[in-house]
Structures are given as C-alpha cells and as structure tokens.
Image (cartoon, rainbow, N blue to C red):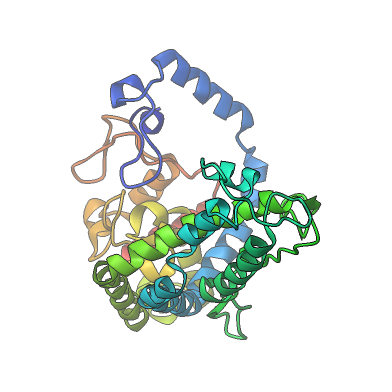
C-alpha cells in the first residue's frame, strides 16, 4: 500500500495515492491490492522460479565485462555521430527547403505538390505520369533521397562476438531508399503496408523524414561541445567501471568470510543479487557496469563494513528478519524501527537459501 500511495523515489514508479500526490483514493488502492493478490504467484510457482533467478543473476555477474565493453562501444558510436553532425548538416542541411522549393517553384511545381506546402503553382512543369510531381522534381527527389541515405546514416549493432561484446557500425539510412520514376505514379512501396504507394505521398514522407532527422542533426551540430561534454563524461564513467569491476564477486574470498563452500558462497551471491540487490546495491537495476558494489545501499540501507552484524549481532535474528520482513512501527534488531517497506522472503525462499543470503550480507 505504501508503494502504491507514495511511489518509489529514484525509479519510474510514481506516487498514485492522494496522500502521495496521486489521484487514487484509499478505496481504489485497496481494490488494486486485492486484484494484485488475486494474480500473485502461488508459493509453488514462486519456488519454481528461484533457480532461474539465481542463474540469471550469476550470468549477469559473469557477463558484466562484456556489457561494460558493449556500452563503451555504443558510447563511442554516439560520440562519433555527434562529431560528424556538422559535416552531415553541410551536405544535407538545405534539403527540406530544396524539396519545398521543388514543390512550389515555377517549372517544377504542380497544383498538387504546391498544395502540400500551402502554396499555389503559377507555372506548372511537365508531369509525364500525372502523379502530382513534375519530371524534374522526381529527378531531384531521387538525388536528394540517395544522398540522404548515404549521409544521414544510422547506428546499428553487430552480433555479439564470442565473448559477448557488441560492436556498432553506421549503415545507410534505408528510410531514404526511394526512387521516383517520371513514368511511374507508384515508384515505391509503402514501408508499413508494403503496397505500392503514390509518388506524391512518398515525397511527403521524404520531406517529413528530412525535417525530423535534420532537426536532430542540426541541434547536435549547434551544441556539439555540450553534447560531447556529457558523452565524454559518460565514457569516463564506463571506463572507470570496467577498470574497477564493482559488479564482480570473489567467490573464494566470500566462501572464507561466510564459512561455507565456494558453491554455497556462489549461490548466496546469486540469491542476494536476484532478491536483494535492487534495493541494497546502488546502480544494480541499471546493469552491472553501473553497480557501486554489493550491498552499497540504494533504496534500502547499505550492508557493507559489517553493518548487518551491527544491526543483528545474532545471525538467527537476521534470518528471522529476512523471513518475515518489516512491519510499520515494529522494532527489529538494534534500534531498528520497521516501515513495512521490506518484504518477507520466508514464503518464496527456503530457510537454507535465506541463511546463505544472510551469511553473504554479513560478509560484505
């Protein structure tokens, strides 16, 4: 009820209750909670998902380096795109106005094309296929489209390599793969319906694409330094993340600290990441390269530097706490006062798994 009413700061979840600034009444929230209860997983279904959740969490740890390198590659592609904006604008920047001029200028206009830009055609040109575009206009539109296809390129990803790293390349912009034939009224297929489309309609689409794409290119070129400042800072962050590798877990060291086998320590780390890290590890939800270290604290409190042991001197008390969660206003551990925000895991995880989580938290 708290989450629905007040939302969750730092996440996309907004406050929905009147008390939190939203629009839902108490009764509406209660009905929503009842609906959520009606569709929640059974205990058996929740247990069945544990192994998959642990496997995904451990795979994410293993794949952290590949993810970081992939993000660095994408960041570099974005940097290169911003740096290329001025050159691309120099080649294509006048194209929207050029197209509009063709639609309305004497000798290249038709009544139909001039109407597209809200003008009158005083001296129509030759329109052999009677598609609303003059022969000269169709010739120029074909040239403009071809140049735009090669200049206003798009960034696309290549398949991951054997290490799982994704690289990026620029490829021709196929939204400009248009050719206007002066003897065909339907020279191109509509990209959505795949059916032949009227040339005048596709010419309008070409103009719309140019206006939207060049707006972005123009802004990037005009504010290149500002964009590059942010992108370079992001690149520095990702490079530091790759060097620091805060998502990694030394399973051997964890096993020693936890007093368990390496396999048990590995499972404990996987369980923690799968069920606890979204609240207790800064940056976890954004992906491994953004992690600030296991138990570093986010929505939930930090668990590092022995804080779990300070809060719960006796491990069985912490195990019971993780099983039951918090109740609003109810004391827990040493000077802890519950808010009801932390759920209990006793119905979806085994006692053995909860003990591994607790041992892992106490080792951080």
In this view of the protein, which residue sits in the foreground, 101 or 89?
101
Q: Could you say where residue 126 lies in the image, as x and y percent from the top left?
A: 70, 57
Which residue, as the protein is rendered here, is positioned at the far left?
Answer: 335
In this view of the protein, which residue sits in the foreground, 55 or 131?
131
Q: Is residue 5 above or below residue 150?
A: above
Residue at 35% across / 40% down in the picture? 8
Q: Could you say where residue 261 lies in the image, as x and y percent from the top left?
A: 49, 75
**Quarter containing the C terminus:** bottom left
In this view of the protein, which residue sits in the foreground, 149 or 334?
149
Asked where in the image residue 241 lies, by quadrant, the reply is bottom left
Residue 351 visible in this rendered orientation of the protein: yes
89 displayed left or right of 347: left
**Quarter containing the N terminus:** top left
Residue at 24% across / 63% down in the picture? 306
60 displayed left or right of 139: left
157 displayed left or right of 319: right
Q: Could you say where residue 317 lies in the image, as x and y percent from the top left?
A: 34, 48
């Amino acid at each position: 009820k708290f989450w629905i009413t007040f939302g969750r700061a730092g996440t996309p979840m907004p406050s929905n209750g009147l008390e939190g600034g939203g629009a839902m009444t108490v009764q509406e929230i209660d009905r929503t909670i009842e609906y959520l209860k009606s569709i929640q997983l059974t205990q058996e279904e929740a247990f069945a998902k544990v192994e998959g959740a642990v496997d995904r969490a451990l795979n994410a740890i293993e794949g952290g380096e590949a993810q970081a390198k992939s993000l660095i590659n994408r960041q570099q592609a974005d940097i290169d795109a911003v740096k290329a904006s001025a050159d691309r604008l120099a080649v294509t920047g006048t194209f929207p106005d050029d197209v509009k001029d063709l639609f309305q200028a004497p000798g290249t206009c038709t009544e139909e094309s001039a109407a597209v830009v809200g003008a009158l055609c005083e001296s129509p040109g030759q329109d052999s296929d009677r598609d609303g575009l003059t022969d000269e206009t169709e010739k120029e539109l074909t040239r403009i489209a071809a140049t735009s296809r090669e200049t206003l390129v798009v960034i696309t990803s290549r398949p991951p390599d054997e290490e799982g790293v994704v690289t990026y390349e620029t490829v021709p912009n196929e939204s400009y793969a248009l050719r206007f034939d002066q003897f065909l009224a339907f020279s191109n297929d509509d990209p959505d319906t795949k059916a032949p489309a009227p040339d005048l309609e596709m010419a309008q689409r070409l103009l719309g694409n140019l206006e939207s794409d060049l707006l972005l290119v123009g802004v990037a070129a005009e504010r290149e330094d500002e964009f590059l400042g942010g992108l370079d800072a992001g690149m520095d962050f990702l490079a530091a993340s790759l060097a620091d590798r805060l998502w990694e877990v030394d399973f051997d060291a964890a096993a020693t600290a936890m007093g368990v086998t390496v396999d048990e320590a590995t499972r404990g780390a996987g369980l923690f990441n799968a069920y606890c890290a979204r609240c207790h590890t800064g940056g976890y939800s954004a992906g491994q390269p953004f992690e600030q270290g296991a138990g570093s604290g986010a929505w939930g409190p930090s668990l590092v530097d022995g804080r779990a042991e300070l809060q719960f001197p006796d491990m069985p008390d912490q195990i019971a706490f993780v099983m039951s969660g918090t109740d609003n206003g109810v004391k827990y551990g040493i000077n802890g006062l519950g808010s009801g925000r932390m759920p209990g895991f006793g119905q979806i995880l085994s006692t053995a798994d909860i003990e591994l989580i607790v041992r892992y938290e106490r080792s951080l």
